[in-house]
Image: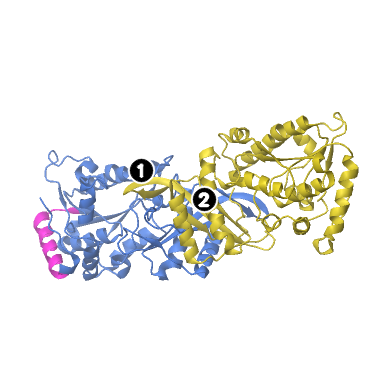
Chain colours: A yellow, B blue
Amino acid sequence: MTIQEIPAKNLDTRKFIDDQVNSIKEAVGPNLAINALSGGVDSSTVTMIGHKALGDQLKTYFINNGLMREGEPEHVVSLFRDLGVPVQLVDARAEFLGALKGIRDPEEKREAITQTFYKQVFRRLVLECGAKHLLQGTILTDVDETVAGIKRQHNVFEQLGINPEEAFGYRILEPLVQLRKDGVRKVAEALGLPASVYGRMPFPGPALSARVIGEATPERIALVRKATAITEEMLASSGAFQYMAILHEDRVTGMRDGKRDFGFQIEIRCWDSHDARRAFPTRLAWETLEDLSLRILDGVPGVVSVTYNIAPKPPSTMEAV
Amino acid sequence: MTIQEIPAKNLDTRKFIDDQVNSIKEAVGPNLAINALSGGVDSSTVTMIGHKALGDQLKTYFINNGLMREGEPEHVVSLFRDLGVPVQLVDARAEFLGALKGIRDPEEKREAITQTFYKQVFRRLVLECGAKHLLQGTILTDVDETVAGIKRQHNVFEQLGINPEEAFGYRILEPLVQLRKDGVRKVAEALGLPASVYGRMPFPGPALSARVIGEATPERIALVRKATAITEEMLASSGAFQYMAILHEDRVTGMRDGKRDFGFQIEIRCWDSHDARRAFPTRLAWETLEDLSLRILDGVPGVVSVTYNIAPKPPSTMEAV
């Protein structure tokens, strides 16, 4: 079946929301539904639409995988609480960080996170809560990329290790599947979500593990989390498309208390882009670069060197890992 | 014995050169002397003074260790030939690159180069040519740093594995030992050496192996040699104290022909400094940074990412390795 795209410029957000709320109500009936909220614009929008349709019949979970930014789990949960949407915070840090132990290869890190999410944590929540309807924030771009072989096949049942025929009644609902990112942002705004959600900067699925070259140990995640907090605070006013701090695995020479010291290096990337297909390093003011470097050297233990990316995409990519 | 420093401001270069020429003549008499020329300001100055004193009695060798910059060995030899000083080019690339094989630690790389130089290549030349006088470009700062424990003890005989008491008659001559770098530059200029020598930017002893994080394989040296040539050409007019390209060991994601590709990253450092004790990243124009990045991405195979250092020394150091 071909999916009928709704381009953002033709989108009647009121009507779209009403239509999706009605379809969800009809599909779920008197039963329970479940969804996982990451705080990104897609899953936040699904959570709001699902809650409008189902109220207490929707169980929304925020899974803390230990790879989130500073204060992110608490921030997302309290933001939705203030909007009247209850979200249950699940502490799965030990499971994810355990699964990442000893893994240095970027693809294997991604795989470990996906497997832990679907096969362990989310599967357990689905089975425990008894919901047979899963709300997913799939958008049309995800479908395209799956078809093109860029993204993994999003057959969620297979990911969960649930055979929907054997376990009769399981159903996936994808209310955003006719939209692209710009459409989702309009719907999110119409739903009353704040600009910090509907205008949110892209953030990778594997979260801070994608901001660490090499093994994502708890110590290295904590380190890049500090650098990320400083970078995001300092570059919030830059107007850039996306900015990030990356912890390198290479050690470089530095001086601490007059002694040679092999220390860490943090790379900053800050991108100008319209659609993420091509991107250019933002021409930040030298004062900003210098302040940023000093704050990172001062605030992140063991860091002796900071660099700024000057290569465009392509041949670079936005993320390093 | 305390060495009597001659500060650059009190230096009478004519008199200094005459005094050193006379001492060398007197010390060497009718015999042969040997020295190794690297093309740096110290060894170039010693070569000129030694040649003034001894003419054909001085055997000067340029040892190509395979870690030199593009065209450097040929350039240095022809520069001295044009000044009337014969220099013998020794191809020792296989020995040095062989000694570096499998070594990733910076200290061990340095040690492998030092050992190969003294215990193998230079020792063989000393013994073969029959010279018992060695001219060395030691300056006062080297002596200070040896005393302070920053540099290794420069007991050259020990380095060479020659016991001067058993092998009677061996003697080291250090004509520059009363000077610091600024004094040596004045003497070099007075000797008629070109600005490319007396004003030469600092370059590390371990040469390009210090510009590679991790193992210095022939392939990785060739790669950083290309990046160095581009960087030195483009930043020659910057007026900076020192600039360099560093090949990282970390691989980062890039795109080549529409496909994901883990590629290399080159870091550029360009320093403003007076005395190398403190240094700050040069505030290069964005156009320069962008041109430099594009030329490296285009000209150095496998490179998908270029960064620019934004951290000051301290806590950084000038060199990364």
Relative to A161, residue B313 above or below: below
* Rendering coords of residue A82 (x, y %): 70, 49
Q: What amino acid is at disc 1?
A: Glu
Q: For the magenta stretch, what is the residue range?
A: B12-33
Is B1 placed left or right of A201 in the picture?
left
Query: What residue sits right under mark 1 in the picture?
Result: B107
Q: Quadrant of residue A184?
A: bottom right
Residue at the far top: name it: A166
Mark drawn on residue A28: none
* Rendering coords of residue A107 (x, y %): 63, 41
Q: Main secondary structure of the magenta part?
A: helix
Q: Nearer the viewer, residue A283 or A24?
A: A24
Residue B252, visible in the rendered structure: yes
Q: Label 1 lies in what chain? A: B
Mark drawn on residue A227: 2
Relative to B284, residue A73 above or below: above
* Rendering coords of residue A148 (x, y %): 76, 49
Q: Residue at x 21, y 66 (%)?
A: B187
How packed mark 1 is, by other alpha carbons closer than 10 Å (few <14, some 14-19, many 20 or more), is few
Q: Nearer the viewer, residue B166 or A136?
A: A136
Q: Label 2 lies in what chain? A: A
Magenta-drawn stretch contains B15: yes
The CA distance from mark 1 to mark 2 is: 29 Å
Residue B95, visible in the rendered structure: no
Is A90 placed left or right of A246 in the picture?
right
Magenta-drawn stretch contains B26: yes
Is B65 placed left or right of B170 in the picture?
right
